[in-house]
Image (cartoon, coloured by chain):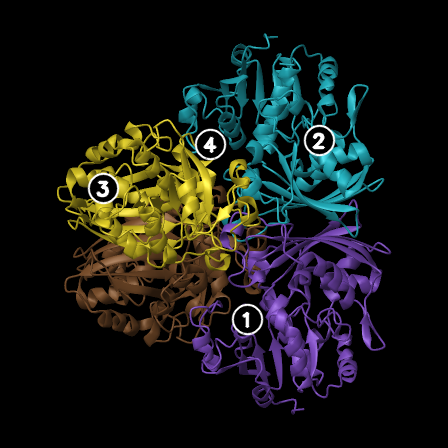
Chain colours: A brown, B yellow, C cyan, D purple
């Protein structure tokens, strides 16, 4: 393990895709991490990163100077990774993520993954740093289970749940959430590029995002779960029903949430729970940590994706419109920046926590 | 009362506003009704209708030829109305609707109203022709209550509820709905013109439409209610919770609905109930009646506002994605054209039913 | 040749693509033509048309009943075409259009093509029925050139030029157009499906449509050209400069046009030329002919794509804002529905003219 | 005059409107200027600024802390202005701007104005700091003309011309521009709030912005003009024709430009002129100066409003697609952020230049 003051060298798996580009864009100038290694498909291999993304760089501004000249490697070049990186962010396609993330971990490379492959793997922790940092203890168990030495895999959850899992998590700890109905209105960037055809979404709403409702209903149970023996056991004390819709916004997944707890909390208790909610990112002042993990807006028509998604560098979850619900106990609106908090930014925050806890 | 073959002469109150324009546009070439009288604000009075809407005609195409030369009257010119009209459609602003709709009714003029003023008035029926046609019996009671002779007031409900009230109504009759959570994604045309500022809604979602959630939770209870003595008593056997959002679509209000019944129906029973659902508009082949009151789409990503709102002349309610709900019993997606079925088209269908039943 | 009262049997080449679907949608209930034959890629061959487009039918409403059961053939099944069709509409991809359109024509099948392949072929007429119907005389010459018997190829021009070629054509005949600068704002449907990625165009403008400016500058010269010997000679007496932009509209290509003539016409002369402009479609009352080939709108802020594109069934060219230009003589705004007049509707109008002139 | 190291105290006239809000938002943390005074309509007077904009703050994030408690004054409270401010930014409505800007100047207060009132006043300089900084010499002449002591008025031009005036200015100096045709595609924020109704612009283009074409054709002649005696004489050596359109983008005015010069420059000469273009903002490293006054993008489909408007803090003019024009000599695409460079940011840059030159 490096000295805590040394910068970590980072590899990006799937570096030319949308999530890979977001990692590269957000990591520019990062105080702890330096991008030193790029992995993409064979068609990009051998090119510089600037050449590989020419004509398909979708971030604002230009390709960061520091990485323009990095040469792109193929995923199977494990030696290069081992030599160039202290850990990797994986934005690999799901179909190859399982094989390669495990090979990387076996080869001693920690993997922070955005792929959905391992989200339901019992010994792989799925982390929201403010919500379930204690699940990082699974890393040692996972290494033991797998016979891995220094390498391991941690994953971040699906972007669609970020706008309500944090607000529910703090209430769950205090008041025991029992049931939730959530309807999401999700931005087009969540589907990557080319992703959603403009003819399908302009002046329209599409009431289906394949697989999204299933993930939205299932993943929170793992995140709220607990380590029992060599795995994470889901928390099945509550049930979520999700409706997931695609709407014509660029960034920012929004959710209308109705919920009930074992014991109905007061409005004051809920607002206090949200205001006070914090975790290691805030306590350790991690570079990507929002000042407030949850930001409650008092204006009656907020949050709104275009106006509020970038608050606190796109890393806070913005919440509003808490009001009583005639069917459930309470209802509210949540918003999270899907390509920052919900994707690369969320992955970076996990990596920062891993470094702070000396896992990388 | 005129002979049933004679065309009814129709006045439009609030003729220059958006809903007024929709009435005029949809009534062009109507087989039973002829627009013969225009009422608008004093600033338009005395002008021809074409002059009055110059530069602010928001319908597709041009002002229908037949009404271009009609002279606009003020609302207080009761004599002209009595002389020119067999009944009126009211699209008056809520603040003056109460006074003038009652004066018109008292003066012997039947009023079919889009205003919200009288929706909660106990002796005013709020009609969806396929759902609660029996509430028209309130007309006689209302006339007796008020001492009115030929005049009366009937209203149509808020546009936001049209996409799920019909699908729920038929299930309520058979299986007793108990609880519903609905999240709407409503089109900008619902706010009229100028209505929603483009800076507020382009590439955005606004999670508040003032007063809409309250109406959405309350109005179905009156529609599903029953006549007891001299008023309509609400059906309080079920509860609705509504989240109402404005999204950047032109037309078409969409709803994600989760619901439970006293006894859980099967998928087959629900689909059969929707397929078989019909009322007097279908039985009497009213001119504006959709062939199917409810159209179920089997494609997994439908209905969608831009693609499906115009089915069956914008008068059918399109439904899709019926699936089991882990918190409630079932969930589905509903869609209704808010400025046709949800506004002027819905009003015209009420008037057609009134004529078929010899109320006008 | 069939009796003029018999319906023509029509094949659609490229039947499952966007333009193919538009043909099928617009031909539903056509008085002269019946779709009897479908050609698509091998992956669709053998399926019914309904099966072949399942999940990718992009037209409003459902697949027309009459064609749902038609079996899809491959392009090389010439015998089936010869047996089933009197002529075909080709919406083949450009890369295979050249080979197959010529094989069909050689096999005796008239081809009305939307592909760009043959637009610049000297003996293939490129037709806008009101503008250059006399170019149909090339058919006989083409047949002689190629040694074809009954078959031939006629093409329609690119959709981007439809909004200004007709308005300029009538002025060119009277006043000799010399120079034109045109800036287009083109709808996303012009790129087909999936076409433009929503992330590329939502809340954005893209100032490049590959190849479009070149076509826009060149095609009008052929359309305004004349038959000399065995080919069409371009009219090089005028020059066009085009800027082509993609904007977030669904349908309707719009153009801002500045132009000068040999002799400057008066405003009155221009408006009269546009009003009086007509051709065989109007004179023969062809089924798809707009009443007015050019519709001038006097409102100062028109035409607008969403409001005006559907005028006259999407077949008229809408023009507005004629005003003096400080650099050129005059400037104006033009609009044409790109998927109706500019694609399948324009092709159908050509075919109607071909039938009226006994070419099919 | 204050010492050059002292911060200037700034008043905002029209502080609650969109442009006023932009000034306040952009001036947060400004190294030279501190907002100390707010002027708005009588309905806001006496309130704190935070109260005055409650429910109508349209900038991202919240009202800057430093100004939340500033009390709003009415425009006629000249004493308060004189006491609190070293100069003012005026975002007054045009109808009252003339009277009050002159009264402020007469009272010794320098005025940097966004209003259109004084743009054509011969002794009021209209400044783009990189283009015509020498016009600031009019200030002394203006003071003499008017008998003003310390006060004066300078204005910034209309936002619509910013995307092409700088690129043309440097070419005009070297190659003498003769004629220009420009078609703009302008963002909705240019119309303020509520501004453009969403029903008018969603999935649409509006080919009219009142008065915009006239300003676009006229203002560059004053900016390129020269001081003769006591006024600025327009440069009438070139002519511009403008088509101005509103498109559904949030920010960023785009222009398609065709132009000819007295002597046709080469591509290399043009690109070099743009690359080398700079003025006092760059030479003096003014805080709001972009590094490059003009940024040329080589990608073939750029600039694009959503992707490129924020380059260099929204202060650079982005240009692309330089290519030969068959009617003119050259054509290109320009883009400028209309609410930053084209409004408050442009005003701040003028004020920075005024301070650097000791005018304030």
Q: Chain of mark 3?
A: B
Left or right of C241? Residue A277 is: left
Residue sitting at x 57%, y 80%:
D75
Q: Nearer the viewer, mark 2 or mark 4?
A: 4
Left or right of B269? Residue D357 is: right
Left or right of B116? Residue D43 is: right
**Tags 1 and 4 touching, CB below 8 Å:** no
Element class at badge 1: helix
> Where is residue B212, by image quadrant?
bottom left
Q: Nearer the viewer, mark 3 or mark 4?
A: 3
Q: Nearer the viewer, mark 1 or mark 4?
A: 4
Q: Are marks 1 and 4 on the same chain?
A: no
Mark on residue B140? 3
Estimate the spatial distance between the alpha carbons at disc 1 and disc 4, rounded to whole Å: 51 Å
Mark on residue D22? 1
Mark on residue B29? 4
Left or right of B6? Residue A182 is: left
Q: Chain of mark 1?
A: D
- Foreground pick, D237 / A19: D237
Q: Are marks 1 and 3 on the same chain?
A: no
Estimate the spatial distance between the alpha carbons at disc 2 and disc 1, rounded to whole Å: 50 Å
Q: Is residue D256 depicted above or below C97 in this figure?
A: below
Residue with the mark numbered 2: C277
Q: Earlier in the sequence, mark 3 or mark 4?
A: 4
Q: Are marks 3 and 4 on the same chain?
A: yes
Q: How many tags in the picture?
A: 4
Residue sitting at x 71%, y 61%:
D215
Element class at badge 2: loop
> Where is residue C359, by image quadrant?
top right
Q: Chain of mark 2?
A: C
């Amino acid at each position: 393990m490096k000295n805590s003051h040394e910068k970590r060298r980072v590899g990006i798996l799937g570096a030319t895709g949308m999530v890979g580009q977001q990692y590269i864009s957000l990591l520019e100038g990062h105080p702890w991490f330096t991008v030193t290694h790029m992995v993409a498909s064979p068609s990009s291999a051998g090119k510089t990163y600037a050449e590989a993304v020419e004509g398909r760089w979708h971030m604002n501004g230009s390709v960061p100077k520091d990485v323009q000249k990095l040469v792109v490697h193929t995923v199977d070049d494990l030696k290069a990774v081992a030599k160039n990186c202290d850990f990797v962010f994986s934005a690999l396609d799901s179909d190859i993520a399982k094989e390669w993330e495990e090979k990387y971990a076996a080869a001693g490379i920690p993997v922070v993954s955005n792929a959905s492959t391992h989200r339901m793997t019992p010994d792989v922790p799925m982390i929201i740093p403010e919500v379930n940092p204690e699940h990082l203890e699974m890393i040692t168990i996972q290494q033991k289970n797998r016979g891995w030495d220094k390498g391991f895999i941690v994953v971040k959850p699906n972007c669609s749940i970020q706008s309500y899992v944090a607000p529910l998590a703090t209430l769950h700890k205090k008041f025991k959430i029992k049931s939730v109905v959530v309807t999401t209105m999700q931005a087009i960037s969540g589907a990557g590029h080319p992703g959603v055809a403009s003819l399908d979404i302009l002046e329209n709403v599409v009431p289906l995002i394949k697989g999204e409702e299933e993930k939205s209903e299932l993943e929170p149970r793992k995140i709220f779960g607990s380590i029992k023996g060599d795995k994470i056991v889901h928390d099945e004390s509550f049930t979520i029903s999700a409706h997931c819709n695609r709407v014509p916004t660029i960034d920012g997944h929004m959710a209308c949430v109705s919920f009930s707890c074992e014991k109905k909390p007061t409005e004051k208790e809920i607002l206090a729970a949200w205001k006070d909610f914090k975790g290691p990112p805030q306590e350790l002042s991690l570079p990507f940590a929002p000042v407030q993990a949850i930001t409650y807006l008092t204006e009656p028509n907020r949050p709104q994706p275009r106006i509020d998604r970038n608050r606190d560098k796109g890393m806070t979850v913005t919440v509003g419109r808490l009001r009583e619900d005639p069917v459930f106990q309470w209802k509210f609106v949540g918003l999270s920046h899907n390509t920052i908090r919900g994707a690369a930014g969320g992955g970076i925050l996990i990596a920062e926590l891993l470094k702070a806890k000396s896992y990388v």
